[in-house]
Image (cartoon, grey):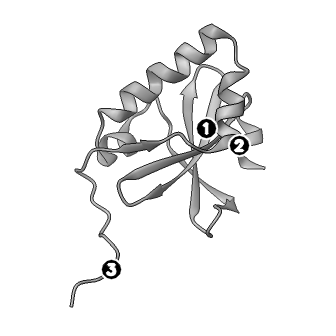
């Protein structure tokens, strides 16, 4: 009998979920140059595999131990633009972006 949950694969392409209303509100209030920087990083991520994301020194993928996601998932912080971090979680092939943070520390609170 096959498991109902898909195994996490490291060589599959990342799929982005940008539909979180908190993330969208935060993105829409950024300056145009900041928005472009965030969108350029998201474009980069959309062409990457999970293994590449984990190894990319520019994204600085880090587990957030002090918080859990909406359904008790492990949360992660990644550098989404100069001066900005994003909080997200992985659900199978999806990277679900939850929020943007203008300073490193607020992503962990």
- Above or below residue 100? Residue 50 is below
- Above or below residue 16? Residue 66 is below
Residue 50: % across, % down: 33, 47
Cβ atoms at labels 3 and 1 below 8 Å apart:
no
Q: Which residue matches tag 3? A: 4
Residue 26: % across, % down: 71, 30
Q: In the image, is 100 to the left or to the right of 56?
A: right
Q: Is residue 101 visible?
A: no
Q: Which residue matches tag 2? A: 107
Name the element at disc 2: helix
What is the C-alpha distance between the residues marked 3 and 1?
Answer: 29 Å
Which of the two marks, 2 or 3, is nearer to us in this view? 3
Residue 8: % across, % down: 32, 64
Neighbour tally class for label 3: few under 14, some 14-19, many 20 plus, Cα within 10 Å: few
Which of the two marks, 3 or 1, is nearer to us in this view? 3
> Looking at the image, which is closer to me, 12 or 22?
22
Name the element at disc 3: loop
Count of picture labels: 3
Label located before the other in sequence (2 or 3) = 3
The residue depicted at 45 percent of the width and 29 percent of the height is: 42
Q: Which residue matches tag 1? A: 86
- Above or below residue 91? Residue 82 is above
Residue 105 falls in image quadrant? top right
> Looking at the image, which is closer to me, 33 or 85?
33
Q: Is residue 73 visible?
A: yes
The residue depicted at 63 percent of the width and 61 percent of the height is: 69
The residue depicted at 29 percent of the width and 32 percent of the height is: 47
Cβ atoms at labels 2 and 1 below 8 Å apart:
yes
Residue 29: % across, % down: 73, 21
Residue 34 falls in image quadrant? top right
């Amino acid at each position: 009998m096959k498991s109902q949950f898909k195994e996490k694969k490291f060589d599959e392409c990342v799929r982005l979920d940008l539909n979180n209303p908190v993330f969208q509100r935060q993105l829409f209030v950024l300056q145009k140059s900041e928005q472009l920087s965030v969108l350029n990083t998201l474009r980069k991520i959309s062409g990457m595999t999970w293994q590449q994301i984990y190894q990319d020194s520019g994204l600085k993928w880090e587990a957030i131990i002090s918080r859990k996601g909406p359904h008790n998932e492990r949360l992660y912080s990644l550098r989404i633009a100069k001066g900005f971090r994003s909080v997200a979680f992985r659900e199978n092939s999806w990277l679900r972006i939850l929020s943007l943070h203008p300073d490193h520390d607020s992503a962990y609170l």
